[in-house]
Image (tube, grey):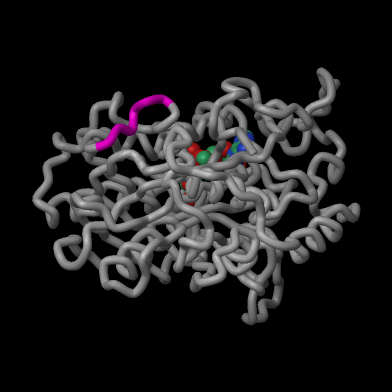
């Protein structure tokens, strides 16, 4: 699917927020659970550390503060939202949707709310849907969330997947704006490649050997990623009549620096225009692109009027690109015109979830699940309970 945003209203992102768990897990720590090394992970993926959710932390716990920050930046409140989409493969539970849980907590009682599953590409699909609903006049203001707690569905004994992923969530407010925001989208899926990155046994299909953990053919996904990141971006740029030289900021899915470097080289994007934060967060799936946007904004690299190209790819296999001009500042940025409001009523469901999560379920406790195996090393000290991270602890993205 490819199209330019020439019809209907001009729509853009007017608020952005994100949240990662406090707990930092370094490559060194992972080498205590599986047979890997910091050197291998760094060289093959560019990842130094990732954030891992606490046992009682579900997707909505990460997404809620991200949503609140996005609403605050846009200068609107939950009740102003009439569409809430959560892109994820790790919702709090199969139903009710995490979007409905968030809508309740935010007081978005008028909102249509649903989850969307498109692997790591979910946020791009959700952006396109949000844009379409607003441009078509069906909704006035959307909250689009991308986030995952992939640590819950990783096999903490499988080094080929464990080292790649992290947890995190981001949210954006979409609204009509006076000048063109979104310019075009290109989205696609190739179900034939689905078994290269999948979670067999997680739905209604019965398997002889069901599994509750992510399975991946890393080499195939690597090949797909290097091809599709370039192809999708090139097709979209051509359709929109925009040259890569005009793009101010390139925000690729944060899967792996080798994949990003390849795409960047092929597309001809100068490295200073590329956003990379996979080193600090790993691959956060649907959270990847909004977290990268938030990082760029925090670094002053995402300025109003700039042309932004984003491309995601992931399970499905799916992909999606969006081209947009970053909007003027939202009304609530720097607190102007914004009044922060707590969650409406009693967040009963989330409280109940937290009680369930607080039970000592082995699968939720990766640090205790396995004792050091092949590479047992003395722990340098207590890890995983340090808020803020190894660097940039006070950065906006780490705030609750
Ligand atoms: O959103 C999309 C999500 N998925 C991805 O982005 C994954 C895309 N794929 C990749 O990023 C890469 O394929 C990986 C990083 C997963 C693997 O890198 P690679 O260069 O393709 O390595 P490989 O799979 O060819 O494995 C090379 C070796 C193997 O050992 P042998 O057979 O050569 O003895 C693996 O068993 O590296 C071994 N290996 C590891 N060694 C240490 C695999 N994982 C690890 C590990 N630590 N964590």
Left or right: residue 380 versus residue 389 is right
Q: Which range of residues does the magenta coloring cover?
A: 299-304
Predominant SS of the magenta segment: loop
Q: Residue at x 32, y 62 (%)?
A: 131
Instruction: Check the image and name the residue furthest to the top.
Output: 380
Left or right: residue 106 versus residue 33 is left
Left or right: residue 136 versus residue 362 is left
List x then y, in percent, for residue 215: 60, 58
Against 174, is 230 above or below?
above
List x then y, in percent, for residue 225: 38, 49
Against 367, is 318 above or below?
below
Q: Residue at x 63, y 65 (%)?
A: 104
Against 79, is 326 above or below?
above
List x then y, in percent, for residue 99: 57, 65
* Residue 303 shows up from this direction: yes
Q: Residue at x 69, y 41 (%)?
A: 52
Circle count? 0
List x then y, in percent, for residue 139: 37, 70
Residue 366, magenta (yes or no): no
Q: Residue at x 75, y 66 (%)?
A: 349
Left or right: residue 321 versus residue 46 is left
* Residue 289 shows up from this direction: no
Return the residue nearer the eye: 209 or 339: 339
Return the residue nearer the eye: 281 or 374: 281
Instruction: Check the image and name the residue furthest to the right.
Output: 360
Quadrant (top left/top right/bottom left/bottom right) for the N terminus: bottom left
Quadrant (top left/top right/bottom left/bottom right) for the C terminus: top right
């Amino acid at each position: 699917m490819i199209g330019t945003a020439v019809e209907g209203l001009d729509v853009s992102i007017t608020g952005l927020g994100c949240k990662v768990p406090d707990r930092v897990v370094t490559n060194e720590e992972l080498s205590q659970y599986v047979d890997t090394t910091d050197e291998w992970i760094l060289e093959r993926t560019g990842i130094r550390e990732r954030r891992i959710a606490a046992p009682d932390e579900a997707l909505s716990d990460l997404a809620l503060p991200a949503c609140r920050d996005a609403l605050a930046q846009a200068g609107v409140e939950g009740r102003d939202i009439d569409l809430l989409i959560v892109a994820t493969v790790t919702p709090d539970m199969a139903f009710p949707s995490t979007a409905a849980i968030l809508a309740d907590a935010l007081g978005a009682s008028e909102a249509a709310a649903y989850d969307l599953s498109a692997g790591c590409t979910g946020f791009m699909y959700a952006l396109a849907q949000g844009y379409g609903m607003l441009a078509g006049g069906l909704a006035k203001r959307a909250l689009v969330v991308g986030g995952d707690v992939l640590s819950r569905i990783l096999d903490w004994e499988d080094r080929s997947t464990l080292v790649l992923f992290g947890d995190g969530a981001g949210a954006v407010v979409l609204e009509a704006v006076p000048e063109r925001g979104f310019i075009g989208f290109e989205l696609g899926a190739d179900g034939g490649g689905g078994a290269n990155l999948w979670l067999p046994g997680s739905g209604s299909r019965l398997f002889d050997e069901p599994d509750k953990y992510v399975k991946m053919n890393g080499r195939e996904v690597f090949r797909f990623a290097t091809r599709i990141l370039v192809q999708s971006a090139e097709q979209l740029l051509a359709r929109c009549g925009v040259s890569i030289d005009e793009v101010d900021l390139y925000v690729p899915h944060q899967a792996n620096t080798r994949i990003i470097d390849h795409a960047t080289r092929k597309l001809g994007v100068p490295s200073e225009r590329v956003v990379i934060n996979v080193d600090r967060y790993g691959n956060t799936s649907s959270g990847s692109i909004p977290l990268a946007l938030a990082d760029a904004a925090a670094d002053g690299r995402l300025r109003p009027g700039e042309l932004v190209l984003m491309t995601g790819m992931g399970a499905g296999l799916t992909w999606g690109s969006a081209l947009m001009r970053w909007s003027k500042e939202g009304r609530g940025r720097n607190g102007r015109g914004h009044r922060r409001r707590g969650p409406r009523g009693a967040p009963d469901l989330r409280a109940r979830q937290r009680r369930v999560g607080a039970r000592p379920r082995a699968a939720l406790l990766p640090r205790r699940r396995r004792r050091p195996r092949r590479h047992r090393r003395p722990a340098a000290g207590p890890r995983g309970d340090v808020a803020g991270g190894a660097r940039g602890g006070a950065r906006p993205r780490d705030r609750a």
